[in-house]
Amino acid sequence: MEAKRGSVKPSVKEIKFAEDKMSATIEFNAVMIAGDYTVTVTGLTEEALTGTVKVEAEKLTKIEFLSDVAVQSEVMTGTTLDNINLKMNVQAKNQYDEIVNDKLRASSISITASKGASTGHEINKEGILTIKGNATDMFKVDDKVVVTIVDSETGVTATKTVTVVKSAQVDTIVLGELKTDDVELAKKPINVNNMGSEFAKYYIPVEIKDQYGNVLKAEELKDVNVLSSNDNIIRLAGTKIVNLAKVGTVIKFQAPKSPATHGTAVLTVVAAGTGKTANTTVKVLENAKTDVLTVSTPEKALKLEVKVELPFTAVDQYGNDLVSNTELVKDGVASGSKLLKFTDGSSITTTGATIDYSVDYGNKNKVKLHITPDAENVVITAVSATGKAQTLNLKAEKAPAAASLGGLSKDIYNLIQKGQTQTISLDDIVINDQYGEKINLPAGFSLKFEAEDGAADKVGITNTTLNNSTTSTVISAGVKGTEVFEISLIDNSSPAKTLDTITVTFETVELKDITTFGMKEVGKIFTGASTKYNNPTSDYAKNLTIFGKKGSAEVKVDQGLLVSATATAPIEVVGSAIPYKAIDTKGLDKTATLTGVVAGADNPLTITQTLTYSDAQSVVTDLKVRKTGNEAEIKDGAIVVPANFINGKKIGPVGATSTFQFYGEDQYGVAPREISYTVTNVAKADKSTAPTITISKAGEISVSGASLVEGDTFTITGIVDGVVKTIKVIVGDTVANTSLTASNIAIETPAKAIYNDGDSLDLSSLVVTVTYSNGVTEEIPYAQFVAKGIATDKANGVALTTADNGTEVVISVDGKSVNQAITVNPVFDSLTIKTAPTKTTYNDGETLELTGLEVDLLSKDGTLIKTVAFADFTAESITTVKANGTTLTTTDDKVVITKGSKTVNQAITVDPILVTGIAVTGAADATTIETNNGTLQMSAAVLPAGATNKAVTWSVVAGTGTASIDADGLLTALTNGTVTVKAVAKDGSLVEGTKEITISNQ
């Protein structure tokens, strides 16, 4: 059964089924918030059953006076009467007819009386209304007083005319039977052990009324005493009579005097003022002792050197099952022996096995027994405290031993881009025992990697042997092609022998063989003006990760192939990340398009993804408790935590250092750094004074006062955005960190992975999860590496070069290691011409054509970053002067190619167009000068029309006559006869044109 209010799942305290199992009541840990609730029931039918209910906020609907009289209550100083107040019982009810007397203490409640003081009247949490008197006009017996109670918030009112009567005196006393509200304790007998250890959970109801029939509360019973006839059987608490919520007035107890014993004790209640008495008897049974002790065959197959639970039942002389550690008390014999004794005289003896006693604190302190066979034949003899014996004969199979290999983890890539690496650890290789069950690599065994062709040239490997000291190896994609490795399981005992061999194929994939690229889903982006939970805005940045595909198989690729990434406004991309940016969306979801350019083998490839962003405030809709760093939720409501993993440890969603943590995420996939915690029900196993436990919003636990030891308990309630999660913490045995070794290390939060040449290595965000030899896990941020003995082969802050590209940072502790790959991209420093344009020689007036031009981008050490074709210049922010398509002249001799502040020149040649012919004519086609000293303007028509230089040199050649000609072609007659006018091209072609002119009248 699951209940939700919208998307919020309130924390469920208990689901109680009716006796007929046809209905159930869901009880929550907190008061239900108003709203529509949907209840989903699964497991009854193929489809889930759902129902809805509308819950209104609780409100006051009725105020009632429970009596017609008001009792005098004298206010004394010593023997002097100062005043007389009145007391009477009232109660409040909500719309569900439930008593809600706490609402009578709200500030909206006002009380008036027709007599007495004008102010100061009050109602306590038990519903006792006190009307303050007036010292100058005291209340008298038989006075009539009108009392009115008004709640201004709801408008509910109540008015009663009461009669003043004498002070209350005890008139009747009625005692109930010894009871407990603890369901499990109620099933157990009331014996010496239970009375001694669970006394606080027992009580006897007592109803005491005054002469007016009013039920008197504990605070009105100052003259009432309770006596026990035998404090060694049952002993009254220091405050004997108290008010118990939902029960009423009760008698409470403390631990019996030592030595505690069994028998019958008489409890007597005496009212000193009136002499009224009442009594009841309480019978405490002798402690249960085992009458029948039965051991059974374990459910799992018995194997040498493997601990297995031993089922057993213990029944006492009253026919009750004995289950808990208070019922089956070990007598101090150490676990791991062949004899287990209980304090009641019962025992279990083993031959061919050791026996262990433990307590399951998460399961009502149930006793559990385990045996570990050390011989093939196992004999177990159980003897009860009453002398009844049973013998169980068992046979143990051989101890589990490494026998076969089951392949590689699904997280391992079989296809890797050339130049990239991948780490394979022991945890990535499945090892099975002879029974087919997965086991860790035992001491004295190893795994051997051998290339089938003996070369390992296509895919290289750093460590060819893995064992409990060398726990990982790195494979590197070197040369295109496949590499088949044989992985062998070796028993290194003399003589060494190979137990099993499997083959695994890895493939080095060249960039040109990667058919498509993809980008991991970015997720919803937060753009609100401020964050919650004390999260920095950097928590809401998004990193971009690409992958390749060859066919349907994913390829691990160089993240540096993502050469650029942009997004439509207003989302911004910086490098390979989307940083936090405040964008107003009015609480709505908006979309943008993310475009990534991946450097494919031949051409850039484009990846697109639709981004969703919103400024809607973060809301955590689910909160769970889990083992630190483990995705699986703890659902049984309790967890055992080693005593030294509590005080000073953190249990928050971020940076948890205890063995468990509260965890949740908002709609943007970000865990809150702060939530609210409340600690309740702190209890010491020995019933001594409990410590004070507080938890900061960041999740750090602080314990003051008494220390926490094994068996102590407390409850933590975490609350965030109205979501409540509660877990009971049972303190376990102390785990000595100094004696523990790491059995595994894994990266929880990667460090920065992509750098440029010259950047410094930044490990500050690195968080690893270390699993210790006792199974406890711990999240450790980089800042604590030194204190925790964790080392890195590259120092934080070291300058990186392109030589570091594709390498890995090795993080190690106790011989276990994990690697994080880093990418170091070269930084552009210069460019050179790789391939000249197809055309570099032009005639004057032709247009520039840069097709075929390629440039190489180089780093500062001359390493080629990439070759860029002219078609990709814009994408790489490369410009040219002159621009492609520009009309050229003979003055143009180069194209300047620029990226950033760096340039390179491509030489070009532009040849002139020479003159091929000249036609010389006179003005108006005249061929004569007939006036004295006359002139004729000559002109030269040059062919072709597009000749670069159309200028000519003029001259005149004398014939029978003479003339002169200037530089502009103006011919002047000198003597009669004929002359030849000549025009010679100035472009060096030496082409000329002539015209004969006749001169007369000189």
Image (cartoon, rainbow, N blue to C red):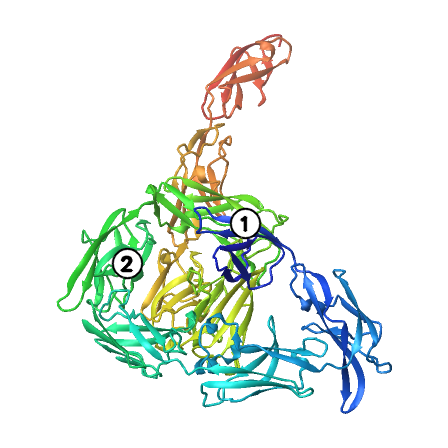
Above or below: residue 385 compared with residue 664: below
Q: Nearer the viewer, residue 691 or 973?
A: 691
Residue reaching furthest right? 136
**Figure quadrant of residue 931:** top right
- Amino acid type of the residue that numbered disc 1 sits on in the rendered structure: Gly
- Give me the residue at 27% from left, 66% from top: 470
Decide which of 142, 150 is in the foreground and name it: 142
Residue designated by label 2? 429
Mark 2, secondary structure of its residue:
strand
**For the residues carrying marks 2 and 1, which lies nearer the camera in this image?**
1
Residue 575 appears left or right of 218: left
* Residue 132 higher or lower than 493, as above or below: below
Q: Is residue 900 left or right of residue 425?
A: right
Mark number displayed over residue 51: 1
Q: Position of residue 290 (x, y in %)?
A: 34, 78
Image check: 801 left or right of 694?
left
Other residues around mark 2 within 10 Å, as few (<14) / some (14–19) / many (≥20): some
Residue lying at 18% horizontally and 54% vertically, measured from the top left:
454
Residue type at mark 2 is: Ile
Residue farthest to the bottom, as pictured: 79
Disc 1 is placed on an element classified as strand
Label 2 – label 1 distance at C-alpha: 48 Å
Q: Residue furthest left?
A: 495
Mark 2 vs 1: CB contact within 8 A: no
Which of these two is toward me, 280 or 463?
A: 280
Q: Residue at x 28, y 58 (%)?
A: 429
Does residue 747 show up? Answer: yes
Q: Nearer the viewer, residue 910 or 43?
A: 43
